Image (spheres, rainbow, N blue to C red):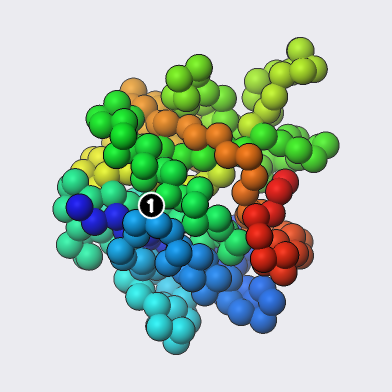
Amino acid sequence: MTTAALIPARHASTRFPGKPLALILGIPMIQHVFERASLIPGVSLVAVATDSEEIADCVRSFGGRAVMTSDGHPSGSDRLAEAAGILGLKDSDIVINVQGDQPALDPAHAALLAKALEEGGSRHEMSTLAVPFAEPGEEEDENHVKVAFALDGSALYFSRSPIPFRRNPDSRCYKHVGLYAYRVGFLREYVGLPRGPLEKAESLEQLRVLENGRSIKVIVADGLSPEVDVPDDIAKAERALSLGKKFYL
């Protein structure tokens, strides 16, 4: 069985055009992500899936592997399904979807996702990460996706709005980290699932899984590197990389 870390990357981004090529400590962000993904325990294949020749050329310039995919994919998971086919991955193989905006990714956290699928059998089709919010006001930011999950860790809902409503001030709100793992067979099936009204309303690809009655395992981590959603986030990423250790939110 192969465990592959695939990185979806597109040049056209509404919030941050050209984001994968943005310089962080003088190095393109996509290079930081690729190098961190290469450190994930158990991963034997790392590749960037992109629709941009500019991004592909950048990846190849530092010795990475780039796979050219269609420019018509509605989500990163759709892009990775095409890439898995190009790379010849089998249905039983595991793909870790490493978002291209996580330059200080903790490789150990990504490995937890693959482990959850290996140990959980067929109970969950996907696995993903969440961390508690730590800074006041972050819960209100629509760029930080929130997740609510059941007692057994099964995802109940993802939203750009704060969830749950905190009538009890002691309740916790969890930030969803856009890192996923799935078996290739489900990834191929995912592409054929209809996009529901919730996915369209929130513009969150993971809701397609829940809207079609499938299950996502949520793993809670204590700390994780910052994601680069907008240009102002670059300073946080540079701080994390400069520290040379996990960046705690």
Badge 1: residue crowd in 10 Å (few <14, some 14–19, many ≥20): many
Q: Position of residue 88 (x, y in %)?
A: 17, 62
Residue displayed at 47% across by 25% down:
153
In this view, which residue lies farthest toward the right? Answer: 136
Q: Is residue 115 left or right of residue 22?
A: left
Q: How many marks?
A: 1
Locate residue 230 relative to residue 91 in the image: left or right: right
Q: Position of residue 194 (x, y in %)?
A: 32, 35
Residue at the spot x=83%, y=37% of the render?
136
Q: Is residue 177 above or below residue 26?
A: above
Residue ID at (50%, 18%): 150
Badge 1 element: strand
Up-down: is 137 above or below 49? above
Q: Residue at x 71, y 48 (%)?
A: 248
52 lies above or below 180: below
Residue at mark 1: 96
- Label 1 sits on what residue type? Ile
Q: Position of residue 97 (x, y in %)?
A: 41, 52
State whether residue 238 appears in this view.
no
The answer to whether residue 193 of the structure is visible from this angle is: yes
Q: Is 3 left, or right, of 221 in this rendering?
A: left
Residue farthest toward the top in the current orientation of the protein = 167
Q: Position of residue 11 (x, y in %)?
A: 51, 69
**Vertical order, 177 against 19 (above or below):** above
Front residue of 44/135: it is: 44
